[in-house]
Image (cartoon, helix red, strand yellow):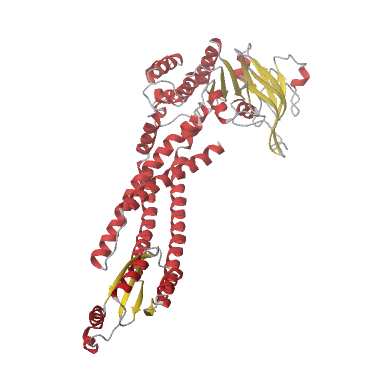
Amino acid sequence: MLSVREAWNASRRAPLLSALGVITIAFSLFAFGLFALVAVNIRHALRTVEERVEVRAFVADGTPADAVATAMADISAFPEVARVDFVSQEGALDRARKDMGEFSDVFEEAMLPASMDIHLRPGLRDPGRVRSVADRVRSYQFVDDIRYGEEWVEKLYHLRTIAAGTGLGLGIAFAAVAIIIIGATIRVSVLARAREIAIMRLVGATDGFIRAPFLIDGFVKGIIGGLLALLLTWVAYRTVDLKFFKLVFFDPRFVVIGILCGALIGVLGSATSVWSHLRRI
Amino acid sequence: MIRLHDVAKEYTHSRVALSHVTFQVKRGEFVFLIGPSGSGKTTILKLLYMEEKPTHGDVWVSGVNASTARRKEISQLRRKLGIVFQDFRLLEDRTAEQNVAFALEVTGVSKSEIPDRVTRVLTQVGLAAKASQLPRQLSGGEQQRVAIARALVNDPHFLLADEPTGNLDERATRGVIQLLREINAAGTSVIMATHDLEIVRKADEARTIELNHGRVVFDSADAPPPETRYTPLVGQPAIGGPNEGNWPAPPSEAK
């Protein structure tokens, strides 16, 4: 209780320094938040494209319907497979006409073969798995041909790997910069109270006792900074979403984790600053 | 009980603050540590409240060994010591009573106990009427009394004072010395570092330990032969001789 009071009194005595601390934390986390927003949207866009990854197996003319149905049941049981759709010759024609727009009349009836469209589960759409599914499906005798855009899948997967790697690297860099800036801000508030800390030590306060108000201070500043950063990121998101292009925002779990990260950074920044200060006195 | 045995303190190889220092202080004693600037008075006090560790030798204070004490033990020890400085070291944004209460709050004394203890100790130092004043509203002598009150409020075994009258005028100095003597008469040992020989001369019954170049050159408890009290440059005893107070410069300043 005394630690909470001390933390509050310290903030009250130096309101400008406290505000500066909160704003620094907020902007560091805002920079991180903006980056995370971009990363989340790239990931979302890639996932949307990825959903179109499918293996299309063309069925030979005259194949009995029950043979196709049995094969589809088998294929549905593959661990990688989410769903198998049968597209009849008519269905293929409709789809082609829809895709071709004004050239739709170039197709004649029954010109296109029927197919089994195999959709894969999210996370199991890498080139190796797609090829393996395609190979297994090809083993059915009535399958004439199989298409899965081998090159396209490989490129997409490559792009995803680059995006994930860059995202992770930049994310760590942004987080590290945020931690360093926040640590420096808290260090300033520790130095501003150096005299008080020295007197506390002289009259017999333990390190734990001296540290506690700073940890509380760091925690509270981290939470407030995190909330401010969230607000700024949301405003940025809304602006782009309304005026430029559609975006997705973080899901609530990510928001809670982000704010808790702010608090954690505040506490860690405080702990290291006070710890290094106490080592010297 | 305080015991220093063959203590040396070196900050760097070229800067030796103390060497071969040995003495003991019993409960209830009043000891003056005297010597010129840089003679090692402050270093001895720092060793006693364990801000520094000896490079060599043993420093024992109330059963705690400075060389092996852990930080928590040092915190516990400091609750049995009162420490007073020349520059008072008060918190400028807190009143006299808040400064004194601070020493109790940070050591976990129960809240209900604090007001009575603060009032008692402020009365003891003659500042009960100025309890709600900020340090800047008090004179130097009064600020030092607040610092002494803060040092006393935990009922220390030893009061360590580093040049407590260094910033005070003569009248305030007399008042602070009188206060320290009263505190000593009540049973607390007082170890006071000073370079003001006038103060020492007026306190005949107090023990005096004289330092020069980091060595004990005189301890009135040992009643040494007079020649050991002669300082190397002026060749006269520092206390009671014609060159009283005329200490040689420390090695770095000596030409």
- A44 and B178: which one is in front? A44
Residue displayed at 34% across by 60% down: A37
User: For residue B62, what is the image quadrant?
Assistant: top right
Image coordinates for residue B245, horizontal then vertical, percent: 66, 24
Image coordinates for residue B71, horizontal then vertical, percent: 56, 31
Residue displayed at 42% across by 28% down: B135
Query: From what the image shows, is residue A22 above or below residue B209?
Result: below
Which of the image's four quarters has the C terminus of chain B? top right
Which of the image's four quarters has the N terminus of chain B? top right
Residue A27 visible to the viewer = yes
Q: Is residue B37 left or right of residue A131?
A: right
User: For residue B70, what is the image quadrant?
Assistant: top right
Image coordinates for residue B53, horizontal then vertical, percent: 64, 31
Q: Is residue B202 left or right of residue A159?
A: right
Image coordinates for residue B240, horizontal then vertical, percent: 69, 17
Residue displayed at 41% across by 20% down: B110
- B129 and B53: which one is in front? B53
- A176 and B83: which one is in front? A176
Residue B248 visible to the viewer = no
- A29 and B230: which one is in front? A29
Query: From what the image shows, is residue A136 above or below residue B72?
Result: below
Q: Is residue B76 left or right of residue A262?
A: right
Query: From what the image shows, is residue B210 above or below residue A147?
Result: above
For the image, the number of numbered tags is 0
Query: From what the image shows, is residue B106 above or below residue B112?
Result: below
